[in-house]
Image: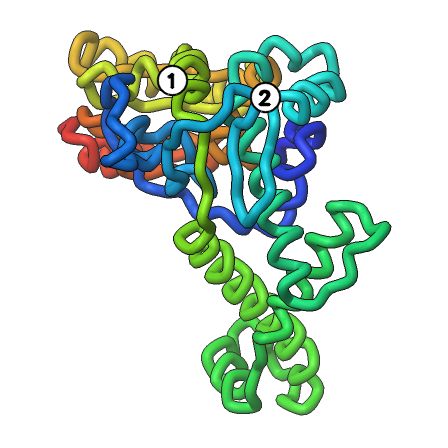
């Protein structure tokens, strides 16, 4: 089942459509103490796992109270974030208010991508953010190419799938498919590099308060508890959940104290699901005792597959 609940979050919707963010390694918990301006700390260093994208490498800085972040000469203000919040559907408003860090990250993503588009010579005057980002992605994807050798290699390696179709007849279809794959790879690489090179400063004092609020949820409490954790994102009436229920109940009985088992209903926790990059349900996240994400899995699994995942977080 594909999730459509993040359609209200504009930046997440655009980026999820292109699957541009890989799951990142999460760290353990650190305190909320302030560092002096002489030692600039990144968001990830100060709040491990709070961000899974562009915000994690942002530097904490002393900014004016109404300036939440700045990048590329542009500032994001509290008034802008309030305006974004006001446009959210009432049913997720309470979630958004607890996750303003996530909303700030979405605004930063849009800001940085529009700046990237301008630098690439893409017309932005009068265009919507979505159109600008799509044009940027198409510009980046143009770097991908498929050679005749690539096509022939795929054809020879997949004879069972292709059957008796002659190479000349299958060539065009294979080329289109391979080109789409190469374009996705180029776009993914672009965003990974963008995470590293985007220069962002975030209001340190604001993040102290809102970083604490953002981690006030079942997932963060579990992964920062010092115990290994398995988090399942699904919906309450999922057939997969019913099928796997006996296996998970046995797991809970076997490790009552040594393993956190947490269920998150994505129909009720849309923003939390978006923050953790959940695009398909069921999806299971596995965190080791330090709070680091060891692996994730989508769909149902057998007892053997579950055991393999649990072994990665020290549960045998």
Specify the quadrant that holds the N terminus: top right
Q: Position of residue 273 (x, y in %)?
A: 52, 26
All told, the count of numbered labels is 2
* Residue lying at 18% horizontally and 18% vertically, measured from the top left: 226
Label 1 environment density (alpha carbons within 10 Å; few <14, some 14–19, many ≥20): some
The outermost residue toward the right is: 126
Of callouts 2 and 1, the N-terminal one: 1
Q: Position of residue 38 (x, y in %)?
A: 24, 35
The coloring applied to the image is rainbow
Q: Which element is circle 1 on? A: helix
* Residue lying at 45% horizontally and 19% vertically, measured from the top left: 206
The residue indicated by pointer 1 is: 208
Q: Nearer the viewer, mark 2 or mark 1?
A: 1
Above or below residue 129? Residue 150 is below
**Residue 93, can we see it?**
yes
The residue indicated by pointer 2 is: 270
Specify the quadrant that holds the C terminus: top left
**Residue 251, can we see it?**
no
Q: Position of residue 242 (x, y in %)?
A: 49, 18
Q: CA distance from mark 2 to mark 1?
A: 23 Å
């Amino acid at each position: 089942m594909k999730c459509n609940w993040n359609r209200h979050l504009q930046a997440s919707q655009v980026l999820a459509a292109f699957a541009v963010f890989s799951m990142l390694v999460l760290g353990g918990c650190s305190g909320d103490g302030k560092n002096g301006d002489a030692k600039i700390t990144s968001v990830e260093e100060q709040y491990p796992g709070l961000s899974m994208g562009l915000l994690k490498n942002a530097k904490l800085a002393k900014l004016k109270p109404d300036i939440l972040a700045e990048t590329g000469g542009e500032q994001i203000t509290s008034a802008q974030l309030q305006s974004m919040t006001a446009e959210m559907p009432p049913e997720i408003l309470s979630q958004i208010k607890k996750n303003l860090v996530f909303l700030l990250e979405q605004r930063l993503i849009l800001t940085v991508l529009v700046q990237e588009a301008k630098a690439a010579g893409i017309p932005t005057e009068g265009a919507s953010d979505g159109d600008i980002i799509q044009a940027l992605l198409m510009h980046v994807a143009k770097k991908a190419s498929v050679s005749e050798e690539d096509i022939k290699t795929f054809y020879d390696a997949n004879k069972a799938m292709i059957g008796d179709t002659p190479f000349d007849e299958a060539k065009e279809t294979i080329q289109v498919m391979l080109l789409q794959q190469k374009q996705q790879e180029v776009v993914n690489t672009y965003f990974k590099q963008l995470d590293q090179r985007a220069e962002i400063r975030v209001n340190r004092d604001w993040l102290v308060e809102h970083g604490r609020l953002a981690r006030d949820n079942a997932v963060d409490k579990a992964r920062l508890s010092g115990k290994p954790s398995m988090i399942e994102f699904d919906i309450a009436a999922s057939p997969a959940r019913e099928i796997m229920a006996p296996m998970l109940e046995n797991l809970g009985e076997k490790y009552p104290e040594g393993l956190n088992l947490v269920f998150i209903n994505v129909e009720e926790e849309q923003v939390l699901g978006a923050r953790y990059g959940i695009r398909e349900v069921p999806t299971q996240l596995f965190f080791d005792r330090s709070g680091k994400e060891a692996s994730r899995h989508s769909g149902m699994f057998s007892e053997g597959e579950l055991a393999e995942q649990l072994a990665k977080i020290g549960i045998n």
